[in-house]
Amino acid sequence: MKAADLLPITWASRTSLHAALEAGPPPRYVVPAPPGEPFPEAARVGRLVLVEMRFADDAVSFRHHARVVEHRRGAGEAVTLEFLPEEQAVYDLIACYAAGEAVPYFHRRRERVPVRLLVMLHVGTAWRPGFLTDLSEQGAYVSLPDPPPPRTRVVLTLTTPTQGRLEIRGRTVSRQGEGPRPGCGVEFLFASPQEEERVAEQIRALVRRPQPSSR
């Protein structure tokens, strides 16, 4: 990765960062300029920047690389930043912190296991076949051509050797449309803690079993 210009950002709180992440399609967010302090020359559209993220009410700090995709000047100056695809894990960690989750819990729930499982993805009114290539109790990566964009509501359906038919509702949080591994990252959504625990038990039982060869 080539050298990037440093772009310091201070958020009032993790809540303000959470609002910014939720407002834009992931992995983008909008940063307003501090009053009377225009953004530096580094914040030009297309530039790669190293974001140093701090919080006025917390000693926590993060760093991540981003691409400047928009710079609105004048009154209400703001820049739109996009996380680099190769820093998905950093994005997940920052989003976890912004949502108020403890970092140790983040590491536990984000632990994904490589798998190779046929899955049907329900998008809108259509069912589309794909493969789960990694899986955790909270999400999965679905490999399929022309994946749906982030924030799309989906239903994953697969048949497990011991649990039978398993349906999990979710929403897409990332999209890889090109390259050797097109697909989408899916975050699972649960109607209740009881449903979350039931699905988690089924997934734990599933990933403990030997996976079929992809050959």
Image (cartoon, rainbow, N blue to C red):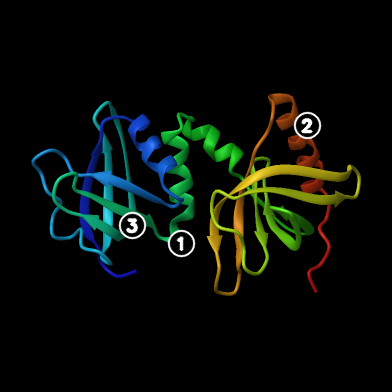
Q: Amino acid at mark 1?
A: Glu
Residue 69: quadrant of the picture: bottom left
Residue 5 to residue 21: above or below: below
- Secondary element type, mark 1: helix
**From the viewer's perspective, is residue 144 above or below residue 81?**
below
- Circles 1 and 2, Cβ within 8 Å, touching? The answer is no
40 in relation to 96, above or below: below
Label 3's element? strand
Name the foreground residue: 4 vs 149: 149
- Name which residue lies at 60% across and 68% down: 182
Label located before the other in sequence (2 or 3): 3
Residue found farthest to the left: 36
Amino acid carrying label 3: it is His
Label 2 sits on residue = 198
> Label 1 belongs to which residue?
86
| Point 29% across, 60% down: residue | 68
When the figure is inspected, residue 167 is found, relative to residue 213, above or below; the finding is: above
Where residue 77 sits in the image (x, y, percent)?
Answer: 18, 48
Q: Which residue is mark 3?
A: 65
Q: CA distance from mark 2 to mark 3?
A: 37 Å
Tell me if 207 is positioned left or right of 54 in this view: right
Q: Earlier in the sequence, mark 1 or mark 3?
A: 3
Residue 172, percent across and down? 59, 50
Q: Earlier in the sequence, mark 1 or mark 2?
A: 1
Question: Disc 1 and disc 3: Cα gap in Å?
Answer: 10 Å
